[in-house]
């Protein structure tokens, strides 16, 4: 625990300080129980103090991993365009139990994930030059291949399945190509 006055070393004072730290952290954003426990440990609070404070905050509903995971998945999928795989990894690093993470990830179905991938590819295509002259062996465009690699890589980094990424990129490039020809 921190150094200071002797009254800060009493269990009640430590709990009050730990609770204050948790409340300050929770004003920024929702956090998982594991995140809060790590912050308390980093600040030097005893594990038993941390457990008591986190148990109390859980009882009053301020610490709820299921709610945190649902909010995190919704926010990161909607606003950052993350796919299920990336979100599962993020929740794991936040210390959310696998069964709670799975429940939160269930709110994203395959159609939602595909629709979000299409939006991301369409947005990226608006900033790319689409000059796909046939110049490679077999009549393929090296520029098109480069665009496919870039777009599929973008989706993969965001946690989308590779097969979905290829399908989405292929269909969106075909649509973009037909709009250019039209």
Image (tube, rainbow, N blue to C red):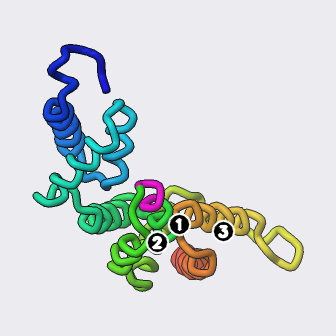
Residue 182 visible in image: no
Q: Is residue 164 left or right of residue 91?
A: right
Eye-nearest disc, 2 or 3: 2
Q: Secondary structure at mark 2?
A: helix
Cα gap from disc 2 to disc 3, whole angstroms: 21 Å
- Is disc 3 surrounded by few (<14), some (14 to 19) or many (20+) residues within 10 Å? some
Q: Residue furthest right?
A: 137
Eye-nearest disc, 3 or 1: 1
- Give the residue pinned by disc 2: 84
Cα gap from disc 1 to disc 2, whole angstroms: 6 Å
Q: Is residue 176 left or right of residue 12?
A: right
Q: Residue at x 50, y 56 (%)?
A: 127
* 40 in relation to 86, above or below: above
Look at the magenta stretch and give its main secondary structure: helix
In reply to whether residue 146 is colored magenta, the answer given is no
Residue 100 % position (x, y): 36, 72
Q: Earlier in the sequence, mark 1 or mark 2?
A: 2
- Is disc 1 surrounded by few (<14), some (14 to 19) or many (20+) residues within 10 Å? some
Q: Nearer the viewer, residue 52 or 29?
A: 52
Q: Quadrant of the N terminus?
A: top left
Q: Earlier in the sequence, mark 3 or mark 1?
A: 3
Q: Secondary structure at mark 1?
A: loop
What are the residue bounds of the magenta stretch?
90-94
- Give the residue pinned by disc 3: 148
- Give the residue pinned by disc 1: 159
Q: Earlier in the sequence, mark 2 or mark 3?
A: 2
Q: Residue furthest left?
A: 60
Q: Secondary structure at mark 3?
A: helix
């Amino acid at each position: 625990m921190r150094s200071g006055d002797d009254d800060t070393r009493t269990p009640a004072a430590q709990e009050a300080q730990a609770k204050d730290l948790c409340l300050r952290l929770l004003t920024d954003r929702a956090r998982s129980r594991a995140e809060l426990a790590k912050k308390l440990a980093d600040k030097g609070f005893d594990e038993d103090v941390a457990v008591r404070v986190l148990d109390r905050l859980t009882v009053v509903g301020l610490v709820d991993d299921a709610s945190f995971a649902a909010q995190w998945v919704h926010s990161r999928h909607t606003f950052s365009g993350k796919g299920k795989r990336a979100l599962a990894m993020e929740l794991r690093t936040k210390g959310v139990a696998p069964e709670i993470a799975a429940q939160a990830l269930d709110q994203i179905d395959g159609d939602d994930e595909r629709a979000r991938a299409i939006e991301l590819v369409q947005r990226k295509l608006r900033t790319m030059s689409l000059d796909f002259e046939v110049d490679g062996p077999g009549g393929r465009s090296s520029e098109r291949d480069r665009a496919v690699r870039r777009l599929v890589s973008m989706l993969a980094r965001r946690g989308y399945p590779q097969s979905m990424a290829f399908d989405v990129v292929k269909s969106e490039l075909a649509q973009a190509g037909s709009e250019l020809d039209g």
